[in-house]
Image (tube, coloured by chain):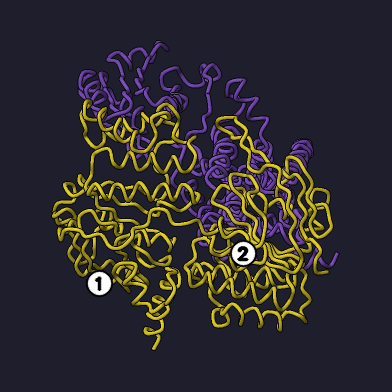
Chain colours: A purple, B yellow
Amino acid sequence: MSAFWERLRALLVKEFKQLWRDDSSLMIGIAVPIILIFLMGYGISMDVKRVPTAVVMEDASPTVEDMLSFMQGSEYFEPYYAPSMKEAVALMDGRTVDAIVRVPSDFTESLYQKRAKVQIILYGVDASNASIMRGYLEGALSNWLVQNQYKFLGSGAGLGAVTVVSRMWFNDANTSAWYFIPGLIVLIITISGVFLTAMVMAKEWERGTLEALFVTPVKVLEILLSKMVPYFCVAMVGFALCVVASQLLFDVPMHGSFVVILLCTMLYLLVALGVGLMISSMTKNQFLASQLALVLSMMPTMMLSGFLFDLRSVPLVVKIVGYALPPTYYMQLLKTLFLAGNNWELIIRNCSILVLYAVFFIGMAFRVTKKRVG
Amino acid sequence: MTGKNVIISKNICKSFIDKRSKKEIVALENINIAIPHGRLTALVGPDGAGKTTFIRMVCGLLVPSCGSLEVLGMDVLAEPQAVQDRISYMPQQFGLYEDLTVMENMVLYADLHNVPPGERQARFAKLLHMTGLAQFTERLAGKLSGGMKQKLGLACTLVRAPELLVLDEPTVGVDPLSRRELWEILQQLVKDDELTVLVSTAYMDEADLCSKVIIFNEGKLLAEDTPENLRGYLHPPKGVAFTGVRSLPDKFVIEVRNLVRKFGDFVAVDDVSFRVREGEIFGLLGPNGAGKTTTFRMLCGLLPASSGYLAVAGLDLRTARTQARANIGYVAQKFSLYPTLTVDENMNFYGGVYGLDDERLRERMTAVKEQFNLAELSDKEAGELPGGYKQRLSMAVALLHEPRIIFLDEPTSGIDPVARRNFWKQITALAAEGKTIIITTHFMEEAEYCDRIMIQDQGRMLALGTPKEIREQAGVASDDMNEAFIAIVEKSRGEKEV
C-alpha cells in the first residue's frame, strides 16, 4: 500500500507542477471563470433599457400628457414625439424607434365611456425584445389607469372591476445576474472538469508520455486519480470565485444551505471529471477530445440544461435530451438552493441521479483507460 | 544467466483494422525470434516494418492477434503488469515531461519505480555523469536539444537497474554525434552491468554495434543473426553512385551570397554563400537544427531572408518570387498530396494549379506516369499507395510543369533501402537530363550520390565541395561519410568552444 501512496504522491507532485507551469491550464481554470463572471454578470442583461419609442399624440389633452409622462426621465424609454402616424412609421422604418405608442384623437372622450384605446406597435423582428417592450408599455399604461380611473369613473366605482396585472419588468435590475450566476457555476465546473481534464489527459496520450508511464509499476487507478485531484482543485477554485462574486458583486441571495451547495458541486464535479477522462481515453487526441468535450458537454450545458432556456418551455425531444444530461440536475439544484431554499425532496432526488451518473462515468473512464496503446 | 533468452516470440502476428477503408492491415506476420540475455540486440528495418508494434507487444502495450510472447520468463499476455514492473522502456518520443526539469523527470521515474531514497544519490550522479547532463539538472526538458532529450529519456529508464531495457528508435531525429554517444553508453552498460538491451533503429549502420541483429521488413522477419553474417543486408552494394566527378558547365542556376535568417535573437542561418550549377545534384547535410530546412525554405521562396542575396534561375527572390517559383518543383518532407484523391485526380489538380492547359497536362501526365511507373495506378487513391509509391507520385507531381530546378526535403526518410536506391536512380537520371536537384538528407551515405554537398551546423556553413573533397577536408582515411561528417562538426564545435 505504501508503494501505491508513494507513486500517487509522485504523480500528484508532477501534475501540480505542470499545472502551475502551463499557463493555458491556469488560464482556462482561473482566468476564464473570472472573465465569465464579469461577462455574464455585467455584460448580459435580459432587461431591456432605453427603448426608443415614437409617441403619436393625436389627442394632446392634459390627460394624455399625464398618462404618457412616465416616459420622461425613465431609464426604460427614450421618447421621440412624432406629429403624425406617418412620421412615426418613418422612424420605425428607419430603425430609429422600436415601438410606437399612438393615442387616438377621441381618447379622452372615450375614457369616460370606458372604451378608450391606445395602439402599441412593436418592432417584432427580435421577438423576445418585443414582448419585453410590450410588457413595459402595458404595465406603465395600466399602472396609470389604476391610479387615475377614479377621475373618469367616479370615486370608488368599479375599482374592483379593473384587473391589475402586476409585472416583473420594473423589478430590480439585478434579476439577470441572479439568474445567471447559478448557471455560470455549472458552466465553470463543466469547463474545468470535462474540458480541461480531457485536454491534459489527451495531451499525455498524444505526447507519448503515458506510453512511458505504462511500462512502470504504475496502476491505472493511480494515473486517473492523479488527474482527478488537481483538476478537482482547479474547478473548486473556479466555484469559489463564482460564489464570492455572487455574494459580493451581485448580491445573489443564498436561501439554501451553503454546505449543501458545496456537496452538490463536488458531486457534479465527479461526474464532469469522469466524462473528461472517458473522452480523453477514448480519443487519445487533443483536438478530438476538445471538440467532443465542447459538443458533448459545454454546449448542452449552455443550451439544454435550463441555463439559457427553460426546459419546461422547449419541445419534447429537446426536453428528453435535456433531462438525459447530468448538468440539468445540477442546474436545478443550484437555482433552487440559491434562489428558493432547501427543497429536500429535490435535493435528494437530484443528488441520487448525480451519484448514479458519477458512478457510471468514472466507471467508464476506468474501463476505457487501459495500460495499452492503439 | 548468460545464454538464456529474455524474450521468446512464437508465431506472433498483429493486424489492425483501418478505420477509414475498413480493411485489415497486417503489421506483423509469424514472428519467431529469441533475444538473448546480457547482450545488445538491434531490431532493424525501414519505417512501417513493424518494429514499434513488436516492441510495444514486448512491453505489454499491445495485444498480439495470435502467437505467444514470453518476456523474462513470463507470459506478457497474461501478466503485463508483472513484466512492466521489471523492464524499462523508452518510447519513440522519449516519454519526457517537457515542462518538468531534468531532475524532476528523473525523480518522477524513480518514484514510480519505487527506488529507495538511499540508492538515489549515487545512481543519479552516475547517470548524470554518463549522459553529460550534470550541469543541466535544473533545465526544463522541453528546452533541451534532441540529443540531450534522448539521453535524459535513457537516464529515466535507468533510474533503477532494469532486467530488460527496451528502446524504440532512440536515435531517430538525432544528429550523428549524439547518436554515437548514445551507442557508446549502451555498449558500456551491456559490458559493465550485463544489461539486456533491445533497440530498434532504421539506421542499418547502427546494427553493426550490436551482438545480434533482427531485420524486419513489411511485417515479416527477414533475418536474425550476428551483424557479421548479415553484411549483405545491412550494407547493400552501392548501385548507382557516380564514379568520378561529372564535368558540368559553369552555368549557375542558384546563387546565394551572405544569406542570413534570424528568428528574434536566434540566428538560424548565419552568412551562408554558395552557387549551384545547372544539372548538378547539390546536397544539404547537417544535424537537426543546423539550419538546413530554413536555408531550403528560403531557396524555395517560402520564407524571406533577413539579409543577403538570393537568386534562383537568375531571378532575385526578393523582387521576382512568383516568376522564380514557376521554375521550381518542390517535394515536401511529409506526403502533401490529397490522400483521398486518386493518382490522376491529384495530377489534374496540381496541373491546374501550375496553369497547364488540358492538352499539355495530358501530355505531361502520360510522360511522368511512364517515368515513375505509375501508369497502372492511375485510379488508386493516393493515400493507399505504399510509401515508395507515394514518394514517386510526389516527384511526378512536382515535375508536371517541367521545372528546371527540383527541391527535395528529406525525400528518403521513411522509405526502405530498395525504394531508396530506385529513388536515387531516378534522381541521377533527372540530373542527366539537365535538371538541377537540391536535396536534404540525414543519411550520410546518400551524400555520395551528390555532385557537391554543403555541411551546415548551428546555422554556419562548415564545408562545401564534392564528397571526396569533404572527406579530405575532414582528414578521415575511410570512405565513410558519417565519420567525415562527425569529424567536421566536432572540429568546428571544438574551435568554437576554444
Query: Label 2 neighbourhood size at 10 Å, few (<14), some (14-19), many (20+)?
Result: few
In the rendered structure, are the residues bearing label 1 and label 2 in contact, judged by CB atoms less than 8 Å apart? no
For residue B29, the mark is: none
| Residue type highlighted by circle 1 | Asp
- Of circles 1 and 2, the one toward us is 2
Camera-side residue: B82 or B390? B390
Is A368 on the left or on the right of B463, as rendered?
right
Task: State whether residue B200 is above or below residue A368.
Answer: below
Task: State whether residue A180 is above or below residue A109.
Answer: below
Looking at this view, name the residue that lies furthest to the bottom.
Answer: B498
Q: Residue at x 78, y 36 (%)?
A: A349
Q: Chain of mark 2?
A: B
In which quadrant of the rendered view does residue A208 lie? bottom right
For residue B228, the mark is: 2
- Rounded to the nearest angstrom, the CA distance separating label 1 from label 2 is 44 Å
For residue B271, the mark is: 1
Q: Residue at x 73, y 40 (%)?
A: B65
Which secondary structure, mark 1?
Answer: strand
| Residue type highlighted by circle 2 | Glu
Camera-side residue: A319 or A309? A319
